[in-house]
Amino acid sequence: MRPLHPRVREARAALNLPEPFRPRARSDGDGIAAGEEAVIMTRGLLVGAGVIVALAGIIFTLQGLGAIGGSAMSGVTFWAVAGPVIALAGIALAVFGLRRRPA
């Protein structure tokens, strides 16, 4: 944030206006600083998205192999090959979310 111009600072002082809000990392008493909350939330989002993508990859694989029927994807070799790749991408995303360290 840019510092205030000296004339603006003088006018604020003359009018008894408070200083502009400057956010700071602080703890709300639970031991987690405000900046760390975003990192924790991002980690959870990455892990959750990774698990969902991995499950979709497993379902695609099973459909491609014909184990799950009733879909246009059933018995199609493309999904039998693409499914494990998608599942591995989801697992990699979840592992990345778990290994991410707070800044």
Image: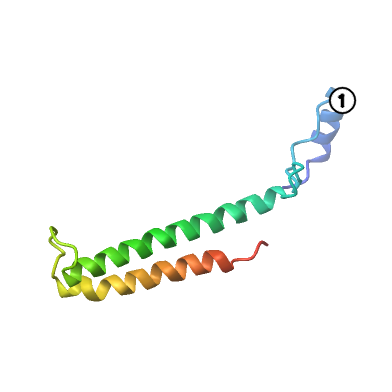
Mark 1 lies on residue: 14
Please give the count of numbered marks on the rendered protein. Answer: 1
Task: Indicate the position of residue 96 as horizontal and vertical percent values.
Answer: 52, 68
Q: Most extreme residue toward the top, as rendered?
A: 15
Residue beneath the point at 26% across and 73% down: 82
Task: Indicate the position of residue 39 as horizontal and vertical percent values.
Answer: 61, 56
Left or right of 54 in this view: 59: left
Element marked by disc 1: helix
Residue 46 vs residue 70, the one in the foreground:
70
Task: Indicate the position of residue 102 as horizontal and vertical percent values.
Answer: 66, 61
Assess disc 1: are there few (<14), some (14-19) or many (≥20) residues with their C-alpha within 10 Å of its C-alpha: few
**Amino acid type at image mark 1:** Ala
In the displayed structure, would residue 87 be above or below residue 4? below
Residue beneath the point at 45% across and 71% down: 92
In the displayed structure, would residue 77 be above or below residue 34? below
Q: In the picture, residue 40 is in which quadrant? A: bottom right
Left or right of 18 in this view: 37: left
Residue beneath the point at 51% across and 69% down: 95
Residue 60 vs residue 11, the one in the foreground:
60
In the displayed structure, would residue 33 be above or below residue 47? above
Q: In the picture, residue 61 is in which quadrant? A: bottom left
Residue 95 vs residue 19, the one in the foreground:
95
Indicate the colouring scheme: rainbow
Residue beneath the point at 85% across and 24% down: 16
Task: Indicate the position of residue 34 as horizontal and vertical percent values.
Answer: 69, 47
Quadrant location of the C terminus in the rendered image: bottom right
Left or right of 94 in this view: 17: right
Left or right of 36 in this view: 51: left
